[in-house]
Image: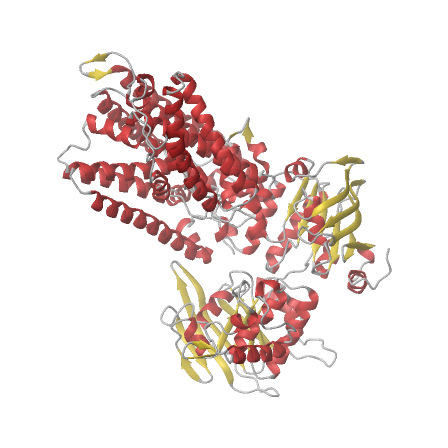
Amino acid sequence: MNPFTRLSRLPAAAGNLIRDNARQYGMVIALVVIVVLFEILTGGLLLTPLNITNLIMQNSYILILAIGMMLVIITGHIDLSVGSVVAFTGAVSAVMLTSWGLPTPVVVPLALLVGALIGAWQGFWVAYVRVPAFIVTLAGMLVFRGATLAVLGGESIAPLPESLRTMASGFLPGPEALGLHLPTLALGAAGAAALVWIQWRQRARSRRHGLPTTPVAAAVGVSAAHVVVIMVFAHVLAGYNGLPLVGLVLLALIVGYAFLMRSTTTGRRVYAVGGSEQAAALSGIATQRTTFWVFVNMGALSALAGLVFTARLNSATPGAGTMFELDAIAAAFIGGASAGGGVGTVVGAVIGALVMGVLNNGMSLIGLGVDWQQLIKGLVLLLAVAFDVHNKRRAHSAGATVASTKRRWGRDRSPERSRE
Amino acid sequence: MVEPHRARPGGTAPLLLMRDICKEFPGVRALDGVSLSVRAGTVHAVMGENGAGKSTLMKVLSGVHPAGSYTGEIHVGGEPAAFTGVADSERAGIAIIHQELALVPHLTVSENVFLGNERARRGVIDWYDTHARARALLERVGLDEDPTTTVSALSVGAQQLVEIAKALAKRVRVLILDEPTSALNEAESARLLGLLTELRDQGVACILISHKLGEVMQVSDEITVLRDGRTVETVPVERAPDGTPSVEEDRIIRGMVGRELDQRYPDRTGTIGEVRFEVRDWTVDHPAQAGRRMVDGAGLTVRGGEVVGLAGLMGAGRTELAMSLFGRSYGRRVSGGVYKDGREIDTSTVARAVAEGLAYVPEDRKGLGLVLDDDVRHNTSLAALGRISTRGVLDPGREAVETRETTDDMRLRSHGPTQVVRTLSGGNQQKVVLGKWMFTRPDLLILDEPTRGIDVGAKYEIYLIVRGLAEAGACVLLISSELPEVLGMSDRVYTMCEGRITGEVPGEAADQETLMRLMTGTGETA
């Protein structure tokens, strides 16, 4: 391969990049449109520092669930029980905190363990007994709702200790200057620097391996755009109370899970199991174990969401978490998951959850009734997935005649490769 | 341009005439002035490499691409036809039987045969009439099954016959068969081809799409060769009394690939070394039916640099042997030993088998070999993620560069490493599966029907890759139903019959008759 053919592949690579990520760009654009729309409709209320802080806090538990749900859906399964698990782990934590008097630092890991055990229970049935996840988790939905009622004796437990409430309503501590929260700004700057460093290191690595890279100007533009977005966001938050603690947890989860799914062999195996379980098994991947651990993970994340939700409500109630599973599933599908499995990204799930969150928040701000809110969210879910299905079909019918896609995406290919 | 009609015994005016068909997809001309004329009572083969336009032509004919989406004329029985959809072409007596069967597995044979065409009065099905007619149709296609049998209980070959019965129920005049024998064993293939000639004698015009030159030569009356969306030629086939066709196979191959193909198999070069792998007393039971032996005390050896053929009819236990060796992916109560360089090795899970240098290219590449919605790069690295990662973290640069080397070695034709493998042709998909296993740097490569459904050009490239691997010192075990392939490629051949190894023949001493005798269990046990 000489450097010229390598060079000539550049436009194709860029084309592929855009096509491969079209769905995600589409969702980012949709998110921006929704944000702008409600910013106008609410007369500028949506993007105030206070409301953005609220947005993060209100949607934190759905975001946590959406990340776990995305993994479950990527493996080709579904989890209908997360709402009940949220309620159950919340109830158990409340009992441990109040009746047993355990301190928060002990209760949090115990609650996560309870969640993981619930996940292991469901994962066992799905992965090893091969009962469809729909059934297992439908049963789980009933079982853990019932267990919640039993634990709480049908009543709510409130109030909860201050130490737990801080989890959901606390902010990053630190000094302020000129009305801005300094640690938040510093964190924003550090995050932006880290992102730029990662982007440029990746670029340098690609170049070292002789892979096509985007032109320097474009790379600088992309990095600059990221820095601006992050700093504007940090600035807005710093203008209120700074970064909520739960926001910090979310950031860690998003970065961690995005890394897991994109850059580790574990993540690659999860995609392979969802894409074709048999092909994955014949490639030496322990498919049952993978599925099992994805459910354990979902259970632990449900427990985390349960802790955050209970802390935010300052009470554990029997009806907590109702319909959360549907919000999480909707977020995953809006964010690009495929019902067949094997497809989806963590960032997609986050964007999907944000679309739902901004819709909720914006519609509440303009005083739209719950009836309209549900109706509109339902239609958004349907249209997002319909758009996806339509796109895929177009891609496939083009693929049926490989030559036609070749013409569109690979005009520059050398002739010896363009047969068949 | 239309081939002038040749007067032949029993010949009539063409029942089906397609003239100057052009079909464009965005950016590409899939069919460029193709003409096809098929007379009633003949078998007309359509041949061409993958992507030559065969399936597009059949989709135009069967109304999948409706009138208006293509240019050119179609005449059926002298009448101009412009089909708006599949139902419309079926009314005109055109039926297509796809490679992938279109039966509802949980319904009975009768229900499937009359699906959408129920024997009913005012919406109420007359089951007596349905079963009686189904029985008659099954008799006509030579299938000895009760019409109330559930389709999923039938073999693939039998299901294909049910499909044909279904077509006959609709009074088919033009029957299109797309790769009908690709999933059938020799006996079933022979039966299907026999049925084809019977239907021809009853006046049906049969269009046969096949990659198997042998069977095309055996049954067709005319062969149309397509290449790059154009008709290359239409050749009439006469047969001498002893069945020898008047057309040379090489001429057809030349037409398909557009060049001379001097050799169908690469030369055996390189030297064969010591025994590297040995399987002793390998026994496997059926996973669901207790006590049913699928492989019974099989033993074989493979030397370094050697391609060993494993020949057998379908159901002989070849795939079962291979898959059970490869991490017990098949069967239960697997027993026996695998030895590598004289040392017994553990192949009880796929991961362990891969770690010991085993690789298995499965027969069902779409279902078992590939993650179809993932791209070329990820599929290539899937079985050797350790090679492109450090402590569980992938190195995308290393992955890109190293998988690229492999796909280049495979001479993969794609528009880049991020192309989704579903959109590749069959031959290129197979190269991705092969590449995936080459990427693990195997010591023993087991190939299960590696060239099934693949066109001639791609086949030769796959043979070259396999030969190259052997020359580099690796061991190859080649499972194939195509005897010429086994003979052309193998240094040594084992035959299997009913789960047992029935013979071992050196490559140069083997011929089709010897192998067939051993494969059917009528030969001497070696």
| Front in this rendered view, residue B132 or B38 | B132
| Residue, far left | A43
Q: Where is residue B76 in the image (x, y as percent from the top left)?
A: 46, 81
Q: In this view, does B130 lie to the left or right of B515?
A: left
The picture quadrant where one finds residue A175 is top left
| Residue, far front | A153
Residue A269 makes an appearance in the image = no
The picture quadrant where one finds residue B192 is bottom right
The picture quadrant where one finds residue A370 is top left
| Front in this rendered view, residue B490 or A332 | A332
| A90 over B131 or under it: above or below | above
Q: Where is residue B351 in the image (x, y as percent from the top left)?
A: 63, 37
State the count of labels: 0
Residue A237 makes an appearance in the image = yes
Q: Position of residue B239 (x, y in %)?
A: 68, 79
**Which scheme is used to colour this image of the protein?**
secondary structure
Q: Is residue B303 left or right of residue B398?
A: right
| A409 over B107 or under it: above or below | above
- Residue in view at x 37 percent, y 33 percent: A87
| Front in this rendered view, residue B140 or B43 | B140
| B166 over B229 or under it: above or below | below
Q: Position of residue B23 (x, y in %)?
A: 41, 67
Q: In this view, does B215 lie to the left or right of B305?
A: left
